[in-house]
Image (spheres, grey):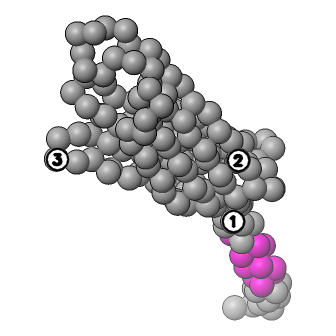
Amino acid sequence: MNHRTMKHARRSLARLPHLMLTTLCAAALSNAAEAALDTACSVSVTATRDGAVVETYTTDFSVARNVPFFDDFSTATRQKEFRASVTRENDGVKVHIAYFSDLGTFHAASFEADMLVALKPRTTSGGNGFFLSSANTPVNGNHEVLYTLMCNRT
């Protein structure tokens, strides 16, 4: 190696720690951005018919980017599942939930909901319902599905 090549090699090696530090910082920022999506939640769902509780479902769960939550709480004869995921939004993270429960031979309950979670913990509640007036089925009456979702970024 001549003197000029050696000088260039030393200069390149001198830049190596800076390059490694830049790469490590970029990786750390990427990991921090991913971690910022980590969200811990609790959901409670109550299905009623004419005011009487037909089914309750409660669970605590965590979601993160590319790590959704899925709970199959089916029975031998009824399909029941709860799903949750999280995506980044401009002003926080959006938690998406989906609930389905085959309540009986003639009826099922399902809903989906989204909640934006900024820096502070958030809670949202909602519900939906329907009235079935057919006397030909054993599930006629007023049906409601109510839920409460609480989330906090971790």
Q: Are marks 2 and 3 in contact (CB under 8 Å)?
A: no
Q: Are marks 1 and 2 in contact (CB under 8 Å)?
A: no
Amino acid residing under circle 3:
Ala
Amino acid residing under circle 2:
Thr
Q: Which residue is mark 1?
A: 154
Is 33 or 40 nearer to us in this picture?
Answer: 40
Tell me where residue 19 sits by quadrant.
Answer: bottom right
User: Which is nearer the N-term, disc 1 or disc 3?
Assistant: 3
Q: Which residue is mark 3?
A: 76
Amino acid residing under circle 1:
Thr
In space, the residues marked 1 and 3 are separated at their CA atoms by 36 Å
Residue 31 is one of the magenta-drawn residues: no
The residue range painted magenta reads: 15-27
Residue 25 is one of the magenta-drawn residues: yes
User: Which is nearer the N-term, disc 1 or disc 2?
Assistant: 2
Frontmost of labels 1 and 3 is 3
Tell me where residue 126 sits by quadrant.
Answer: top right
Density class for disc 1 (Cα within 10 Å; few <14, some 14-19, many ≥20) is some
| 17 relative to 71, above or below | below
Quadrant (top left/top right/bottom left/bottom right) for the N terminus: bottom right
